[in-house]
Amino acid sequence: MQGNNGNSSGNARKIFHRLASIEESYSILLANTEHGTKEEQLALSNARGRVLATDVFSGVDLPPFDRAEMDGYAVSSEDIEGASDQRPVSLEVISSISAGDGPSVEVRRGACAEIATGAPIPRGADSVVMVEYTSRNGDTVTFFRGVAPSENVASSGSDVQIGEMVLRQGTVIGTREVAILSAIGLASVRVFQLPRVGIISTGNELVPPGGSLSFGKIYDVNSTSLMAAVGEAGGEGIYYGHANDDYDSIRSAIEDTINEFDLVLLSGGTSAGTGDLAYRVIEDLCTPGILVHGLKVKPGKPTIVASHKGKAIIGLPGYPVSALVIFDQLVKPFIGLMSGNSARPAQLQRGRLAQRVNGAKGRRWLLPVHVIKSRDAPVVHPIIASSGATSALAKADGYIVVSEEVEYVDAGEEVMVRLFPGEQSPDLVVMGSHCPGLDILLQLLYRQNGMRAKTANIGSQGGLAAVSRGEADIAGAHLLDPNTMTYNAPFLAQFGLAGSCLMKGYRRLQGIMVPRGNPCGIRCLGDIIGRDVIFVNRNRGSGTRVLIDMELSKAASARGIDFGTIAKHVRGYRWEAKTHSAVGAAISQGRADVGVGVKSVAVSYGLDFIPISDEEYDFIINPSSAEKPAVAAFKACLKSEAFRKAIAALPGYSPWGDAAT
């Protein structure tokens, strides 16, 4: 789609008049840019990961001469024909030949030569007898078995013949390719040049990783992640720098990079807000300028595709999830084309969807997922998170593509996952509620046993369901039954699990979090009823929410208030934070006055803490996984003294049987 002419000084909002598909955008990109490959000669020692620019033919035979494959004796097979333990045959040893020796001897009838592995077969010999089948006495050796002609001999050219093609153009050079290229004597090789990709991040809110964050600022994720993505795609990513959200800063950055690099990637500033200036700068600066502004995808709608005199410029959204999935769909194949590596196929994995996913109403949805092995086909768990949730990609195994024409994909339907590079098969799958104590336990499991765990934070009930379906080896849970005030055990039967599946974990102290000095004078949770204080609640279904409602119910009852009307009496009761950290952050930033969470979060945010009660975080073991070595190791780590000490060091945490403080 052709963009309209921008106004460098105007604040008019850009409207996405027509959205293009990824396929259409890629075709437009190819039609309006230069994307041919360039070649260079590179030393073999520096060629790993590069793409061959030519077919490679061998100029030598491999091996280049007949050579011994075993230590033993080079003989004429006729001389020891029929030799055995009952009828041994003796020959005279006339020489000893080592690897690297030249053809200095001839083995005549009735004689042999001692020979080492890799040494050239001497004239007159046609086979080698392993030393294990001989006995030597001075210059005489006795043979206790015969050999066939050419036995234990690698013939010249048996591996590679002179003139044979050993590698084809387009091959990615790895360890095995370096080995064969070395074997045929090449010190350097012709490869495609890495396309140089300039990377610019925009946004007043960005702080370089390692810097200090003030309120309203975030770390610049895209600069480093895009450099890594460019490298994985076969290019060389160079970070130009950061541009503020002003016209002149963005223009200066693009002007400096457009002539130096083969491709320019801009992240942020591509949307339709009044502060998003990238599209205006590109329209004013570049010829022909914007080719596409807006894709029919979720996430990644505000993507820009542009060119300047044959050079490609791609503006990626600022949110990391959006930027990286659009990179995978649009930028990666373009870099592959320029690097000669366009034929590398995506890693795909079939699986069945764990839960229904609704379509994105006319947009293609690129949805990050977990891939969990189960008794049958792999199970694909969607990771429903915002485009700014960077951890969604860090935790994901890949993503699925939900077509723009699809209204929904139902649970149990088969889907195809595009796997991210470098995913490893785990020894253990742990699903359920996240907890820092679990992180410590899994870290100990890796350090002590070298075992890797795959985690999926899908909530306590989700973890129990995953165990019952055979998808998880272990679930972490802290579900409180309000009727019995018992944690976890009452919920096992709902999922068809026996009581023996429950393994007690540890305790976490929960309480009221307030700003340092407790300026509102909160003594108990009932003190927030009818007061002009802002409360931040927890999400329904969480164990903490059950505790909150129980405490407020008792306080309301004592005041003659119907709990059904509690939201009218507690300011912020409808505000549901999904994590303990979200509660702590809201209070520390002054957006709330009080909330409930675990003590470790209060300590992390420098808040005062008023204890309420211990919470029990337990583990539910899949019966079919009980005999797995990784599960046994997990149990041993949980009971170990090392873990007891580590968990006790976390504020408010204690091993099972101890009281949290």
Image (spheres, grey):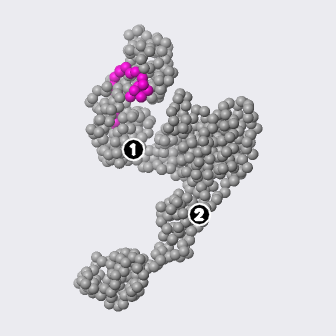
**Position of 543 relative to 470 (above/below):** above
Q: Is residue 343 visible?
A: yes
**Position of 453 relative to 80 (above/below):** above
Q: Amino acid at mark 1?
A: Ala
Closer to the N terminus: mark 2 or mark 1?
2
Q: Which residue is mark 1?
A: 453
Judge whether residue 130 is colored magenta: no
Nearer to us in this view, 269 or 79: 269
Q: Are marks 2 and 1 in contact (CB under 8 Å)?
A: no
Q: Amino acid at mark 2?
A: Gln
Q: Which residue is mark 2?
A: 41
Where residue 494 appears, as percent x and y from the top left, is 37, 32
Residue 408 placement, left or right of 533: right
Indicate the quadrant containing the C terminus: top left, top right, bottom left or bottom right: top left
The residue shown at (40%, 9%) is 559
Residue 310 marker: none
- Residue 98, by quadrant, is bottom left
The residue shown at (56%, 65%) is 189
Numbered range of the magenta stretch: 600-620
Where residue 163 appears, as percent x and y from the top left, is 56, 75
Judge whether residue 601 is colored magenta: yes
The residue shown at (55%, 66%) is 188
Nearer to us in this view, 381 or 652: 652
Where residue 565 appears, as percent x and y from the top left, is 47, 14
